[in-house]
Amino acid sequence: MKAKNQGSFKIRLSSKGILTIPMALRKKYQLDKGAELDLIDEDGRIAMIPHATAEQLFGIASASAGEVHDMLRELDREHRDSARDD
């Protein structure tokens, strides 16, 4: 994996379809083992969008973290459904 320019990385797809996300990006986006990402096919490009946990967004002590997490999941589902319909 080699940076082509700032913010751009060249990665290789394995024979099993596995991609390795560069460490710099895993740290930047706090992606640990088991992290979930959405892959979006848009106009000939593939975007990877990390799912932020409620704790990352609002802090672990937030009283409404569970409710906000549920709302974010629902919005995400609606977005994906809308994208499929287009």
Image (tube, rainbow, N blue to C red):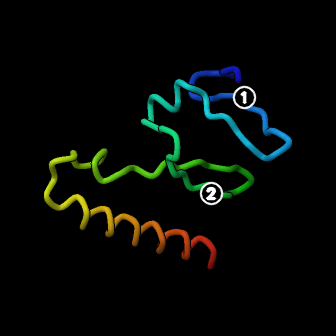
Q: CA distance from mark 2 to mark 1?
A: 18 Å
**Which numbered disc flags the more N-terminal residue, 2 or 1?**
1
At 71% from the left and 24% from the top, the residue drawn is: 1
In the picture shown, does residue 25 fall above or below 67?
above
Which sits in the foreground, 9 or 36?
36
Q: Residues within 10 Å of mark 2 (few under 14, many from 20)?
A: few
Label 1: which secondary element: strand
Q: Residues within 10 Å of mark 1 (few under 14, many from 20)?
A: few
At 74% from the left and 53% from the top, the residue drawn is: 44
Q: Position of residue 56 (x, y in %)?
A: 31, 44
Q: Amino acid at mark 1?
A: Lys
Please count the marks in the image: 2
Q: Position of residue 32 (x, y in %)?
A: 48, 38
Residue projecting furthest to the front: 33
Q: Is residue 48 left or right of residue 45?
A: left
Residue projecting furthest to the bottom: 85
Q: Is residue 68 left or right of residue 39?
A: left
At 48% from the left and 71% from the top, the residue drawn is: 77
Name the residue tied to disc 1: 10
Residue projecting furthest to the right: 15
Quadrant in the rendering for residue 7 = top right
Which sits in the foreground, 45 or 76?
76
Q: Quadrant of the C terminus?
A: bottom right
At 81% from the left and 38% from the top, the residue drawn is: 14
Name the residue tied to disc 2: 40
Label 2: which secondary element: strand
Q: Amino acid at mark 2?
A: Ile
**Disc 2 vs disc 1: Cβ atoms closer than 8 Å?**
no
Dot label at residue 57 = none
Q: Position of residue 54 (x, y in %)?
A: 30, 53
